[in-house]
Amino acid sequence: MATSTVTTQQERRTHRRLEIRLPLQYCLASETGADVCRTVTRDISTGGLYFETDDLDIRQGMLIDLELTIPPGEGYSPYQGRITCTGEVVRVDSTDLPSGADTRRVGIAARFREGLRLAF
């Protein structure tokens, strides 16, 4: 069986991504008392995550405080958990919305800048 080799952005990644939707809260790391934005992840890995938001002020290079909610699950914990860390925005993508949509959205790729802190 012949296979073709295609170089894609996904193949260049260091960490394997899992397509999983987890509740996510984030705010700008530099601002004490900054507004908290809520969304869900589109995918996550040990090195970072990707999510969509209507917060159009996010720019590449910004630091954001992240808080993920981990649901309870058989095999790892009967309790809901929380992961917190600081992330750096490495990419901001425009997203395709249906024509006539009132809101603009962007996709945010962020890498974790430190070890993840897990609390149950």
Image (cartoon, grey):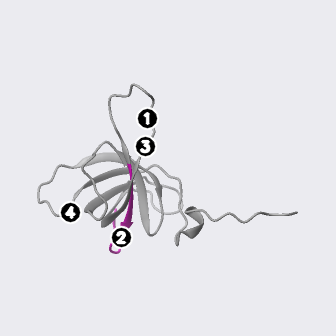
Magenta stretch: residue 14 in it?
A: no
Q: Is residue 99 above or below residue 69?
A: above
- Real-space Cα separation, disc 1 to disc 3, in angstroms: 6 Å
For image coordinates 72% across by 66% down, the residue present is 5
Task: Say whether marks 1 and 3 touch (CB < 8 Å).
Answer: yes
Q: Nearer the viewer, mark 3 or mark 2?
A: 3
What percent of the width, then of the height, locates residue 117? 32, 69
Residue that label 4 marks: 29
Residue 95, numbered circle: 3
- Real-space Cα separation, disc 3 to disc 2, in angstroms: 28 Å
Q: Which portion, as a residue range, is magenta?
A: 107-120
Q: Is residue 58 above or below residue 110?
A: above
Quarter holding the N terminus? bottom right
Q: Earlier in the sequence, mark 3 or mark 4?
A: 4
Q: Residues within 10 Å of mark 1 (few under 14, many from 20)?
A: few
Q: In terms of depth relative to the viewer, which is nearer, 86 or 67?
A: 86
What percent of the width, then of the height, locates residue 12? 56, 69
- Real-space Cα separation, disc 2 to disc 1, in angstroms: 32 Å
The disc labelled 1 sits on which kind of residue? Leu
Q: Earlier in the sequence, mark 1 or mark 4?
A: 4
Quarter holding the C terminus? bottom left
Residue that label 1 marks: 97
